[in-house]
Image (spheres, rainbow, N blue to C red):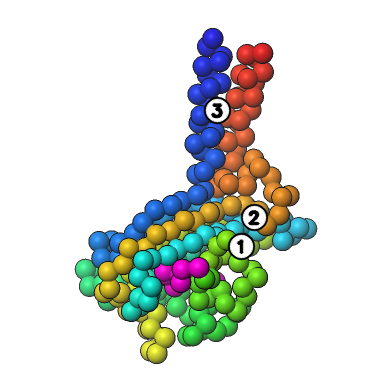
Amino acid sequence: MIYVKSGFVLLIYFISHINSSHIKGSWNTKQEFFKFLIKFGFDKTDTRNPEYSLGYIYGNITSQIVHPQQNATFVLLDRSYFLEFYSNRSKSDKQAACSSMFKEINQSIYDPWCNNNKKNNDFLRRIPCPKGMICAEETSQPLSVVKGSQFTFRVEDNAQPRFWYVSLVACYLNTSSCKWQHLNQEMNIDYDIWLVNGNPNHSTHNPLVYQFSFDKQVSHISKKGIYLFLLGDRK
């Protein structure tokens, strides 16, 4: 009886934990200037099979406001950029905060209007994305967007596994001046985002690591083994 109970508890744990890389919620740009969403570790890219071993971030970010005056920004950064970005979020002058947060990364980011060099880092999306349409940054390569999603980031690192940090901020890049400004308009923005190791368009990914940050994979595999052991022992 003990084994049945233990196995059941572990089964419930796995069912709830399997969605750990799926984040869903709402953000009010007036109530929260900055919203940190998740830290996720992507595996080292397999250079023998890069197409199937990249990290992917994809999903939908929308609002009931059809034509916002300006957009907020979805930001994806690794640790080397994130620490400086994050440390400037608490400035009381939010205009100054926006300028400082993006100062370090401004020259290295890709932007269709202000920095249209596709060799630069793909770190940002203007949000909300138009309902039923892909995000503005995706329009040049719409086939790269995961089906049913408005945006897709592909993360490649041939050297090592790496943590990436996902956040939302009430700043926007002015396409006329190409300077960062504070978003004053209040918006409720809904997000539904997946972070996975492996190509979601293919069935070849490893189910033991696909939805798990690399630092959680060993723990998951170990606990899965314990569950299978207990289940087998029950029989």
Element under disc 1:
loop
Label 2 packing within 10 angstroms: few (<14), some (14-19), many (20+): many
Tags 2 and 3 touching, CB below 8 Å: no
- Mark 2 vs mark 3, CA separation in Å: 24 Å
52 over 21 or under it: above or below? below
Q: Image quadrant for the N terminus?
A: top right
Amino acid type assigned to the residue bearing label 3 in the image: Leu
Residue identified by numbered label 3: 11
Distance, label 2 to label 1, CA atoms, is 7 Å
Q: Is residue 61 visible?
A: yes
Q: Where 1 falls versus 128 (above or below)?
A: above
What amino acid is labelled 2 in the image?
Pro
Of the two numbered discs 2 and 1 on the same chain, state the one appearing first in sequence: 1
Query: Magenta segment range?
Result: 122-132
Q: Which residue is mark 1?
A: 146
Q: Position of residue 217 (x, y in %)?
A: 59, 41
Question: What residue is pinned by disc 2?
Answer: 200
